[in-house]
Image (spheres, rainbow, N blue to C red):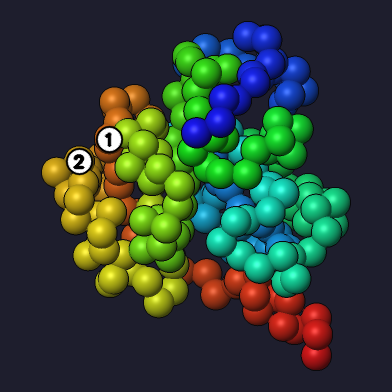
Amino acid sequence: MATIDLPAPCGLSALMGEPITPGLRVGLLGGSFNPAHDGHLHISAEAMRRLGLDQIWWLVSPQNPLKPQEDMGEFTARFESARAMATHPKLRVTDLESQLGLTYTVDTLTALTSMGPQVHFVWLMGADNLIQMPRWRDWQKIVGMMPIAVLARPGYNRSAPLGTVATRFVQNRIPAEKALLLADLEPPAWVFLPIPLHPASSTAVRAKKRQ
């Protein structure tokens, strides 16, 4: 893996534009946000409440390596759609990956944990992404890097807990009723959150715009 050139130790606060204090409980929601929609806001609000998070950072990806470029909106438009949608006071929209020149989740999480070793990060992902996670670069390293909260998504909630990642790390799953403990656990640790489902998707939003 290529060496990542990290900013100075104070770089995380500078990149986020605000002080990042030790002990902060931060959920990380990565994605294309192509565009951002009410579903992103819904799962973020549910994650904040169920995990006891102080903030959630939306990491707008310059380009998802598993998605075709021709269907990807311009980064600036996607970033602005996320900023317009992130109305909750505990949400932060960031172009960290673009600023640091990163593409893969494993590299992003390596950078963040190096810059904020005293921050309690939790990786947030939908049940659909848990199924496809074995296609991600160094996915097992990601599971061992920080706790993970998997949020229910329409059509994936039966298959996700039976997939490769879930079965490989079944002994590290905590019950949903103990989700408030997740941010303080040593990885690997993960939870499946059966939140109320929201029908919105970026694919559906783009399809509606094309009509």
Q: Amino acid at mark 1?
A: Pro
- Which residue: 54% across, 34% down? 107
Residue ID for mark 2? 172
Give the label on residue 188, or none.
1
Above or below residue 209? Residue 139 is above
Give the label on residue 147, or none.
none
Residues marked 1 and 2 touching at CB (< 8 Å): yes
- Label 1: how many residues lie within 10 Å, few (<14), some (14-19) or many (20+)? some
Taking 124 as reference, is 73 left or right?
A: right
Per the model, the C-alpha gap separating discs 1 and 2 is: 6 Å
Q: Amino acid at mark 2?
A: Asn
Q: Position of residue 106 (x, y in %)?
A: 49, 38
Instruction: List the single residue furthest toward the left.
Output: 171
Above or below residue 207? Residue 96 is above
Above or below residue 160? Residue 88 is above
Which element type, helix, strand or loop, lies under badge 2?
helix
Residue 155: quadrant of the picture: bottom left
Instruction: List the single residue furthest toward the front.
Output: 2
Q: Quadrant location of the C terminus?
A: bottom right
First in sequence: mark 1 vs mark 2: 2
Comparing 173 with 167, the one in front is 167
